[in-house]
């Protein structure tokens, strides 16, 4: 079962939920798809790390064939190509590797070469297989790294927890595309509600079974909880605003490994998701 954890912005508690859920239900697989700022490894501190480079294809020119017709420059909507006089130029950091320029070149002067954009690191931590995607600074898209993270072979009998990038951009869409269930993490504020609506719209668009974890809850108004009740969204758990959580989190400790009550809570969360997802699958089959 693949469970994706997402939120409308960073700092909501997405990694807190992902890391603790993977740790509580080990053996499991943890995928850190927040490739611009992966931080799950800071908690797991995986051992026996293996590294694998991730590359994309970018165009290169054979200057003996190029006649400076500008067909490729006018095609590229990302402005990654330029022609200065008769000199062909590539700004490879903003090239999206679509390959269109090489297909359209009338002189067949362009061909593709490999360029490294980051890497995948794989290690283990007390029964959790930890896979982390790293995007090199300045690169245009982490989607190729996320696709390679999912393509890596995983034990079929172990649950996979996907720590998604924040927001709802295309990189998040690739992170939830194969998910069996989505956890939306939200804060109990008006700003938190705005971000919850954003990712809620995304999982509805993808027709993914989903539920919400309300994080940093205190006494008083909770607009995110009210929205869940209005929309009929399952509230999976409410995590209190707790200084103990903040202290352990800031020290890179995993709650589910430190405190029995949180190990129990995240184990219960997994069981609840299995039941809810199973119910929804059965309900869909009867429609």
Image (cartoon, rainbow, N blue to C red):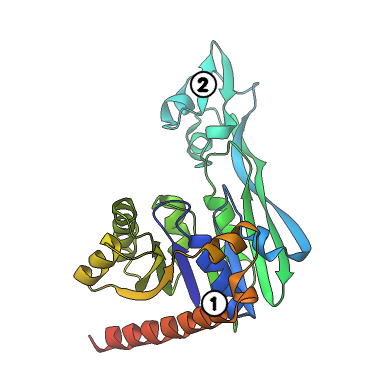
Outermost residue to the right:
48
Residue 144 visible in image: yes
The residue carrying pointer 2 sits among few (fewer than 14), some (14 to 19) or many (20 or more) residues within 10 Å by Cα, namely some
* The quarter of the displayed image where residue 254 is located: bottom right
Q: Position of residue 242 (x, y in %)?
A: 49, 65
From this view, report whether residue 15 is shown above or below residue 22: above
Which of the numbered marks, if any, corresponds to residue 262?
Answer: 1
Asked whether the residues under the numbered discs 2 and 1 touch, taking CB atoms below 8 Å apart as contact, a structural biologist would say no
Q: Residue at x 51, y 40 (%)?
A: 96
Asked if residue 198 lies left or right of residue 156, the reply is left
Q: Residue at x 23, y 71 (%)?
A: 229
Q: Position of residue 151 (x, y in %)?
A: 59, 65
The residue carrying pointer 1 sits among few (fewer than 14), some (14 to 19) or many (20 or more) residues within 10 Å by Cα, namely some
- Helix, strand or loop at label 1? It is helix
Outermost residue to the left:
230
From this view, report whether residue 131 is shown above or below residue 263: above
Q: Which residue is mark 2?
A: 82
Q: Position of residue 239 (x, y in %)?
A: 44, 70
How far apart are the two marked residues, 2 and 1, measured between alpha carbons?
56 Å
* The quarter of the displayed image where residue 124 is located: bottom right
Asked if residue 89 lies left or right of residue 98, the reply is right
């Amino acid at each position: 079962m693949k469970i994706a954890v997402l939120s409308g912005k960073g700092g909501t508690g997405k990694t807190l939920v992902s890391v603790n859920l993977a740790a509580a239900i080990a053996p499991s697989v943890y995928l850190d798809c927040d490739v611009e700022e992966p931080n799950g490894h800071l908690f797991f501190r995986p051992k026996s790390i293996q590294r694998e480079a991730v590359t994309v294809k970018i165009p290169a020119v054979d200057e003996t064939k190029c006649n400076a017709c500008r067909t490729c420059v006018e095609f590229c909507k990302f402005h990654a190509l330029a022609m200065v006089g008769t000199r062909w130029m590539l700004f490879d950091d903003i090239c999206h590797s679509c390959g269109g320029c090489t297909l359209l070149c009338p002189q067949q002067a362009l061909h593709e070469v490999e360029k490294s954009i980051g890497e995948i690191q794989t290690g283990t931590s007390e029964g959790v297989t930890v896979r982390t995607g790293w995007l090199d600074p300045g690169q245009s898209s982490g989607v190729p790294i996320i696709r390679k993270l999912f393509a890596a072979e995983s034990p079929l009998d172990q649950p996979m927890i996907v720590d998604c990038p924040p927001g709802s951009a295309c990189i998040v869409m690739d992170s939830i595309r194969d998910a069996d269930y989505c956890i939306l993490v939200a804060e109990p504020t008006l700003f938190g509600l705005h971000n919850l609506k954003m990712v809620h719209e995304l999982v509805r668009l993808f027709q993914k079974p989903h539920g919400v974890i309300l994080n940093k809850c205190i006494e008083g108004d909770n607009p995110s909880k009210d929205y869940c009740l209005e929309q009929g969204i399952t509230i999976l758990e409410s995590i209190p605003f707790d200084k103990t959580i903040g202290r352990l989190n800031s020290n890179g400790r995993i709650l589910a490994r430190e405190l029995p009550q949180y190990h129990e809570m995240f184990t219960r969360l997994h069981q609840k998701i299995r039941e809810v997802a199973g119910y929804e699958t059965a309900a869909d089959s009867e429609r």
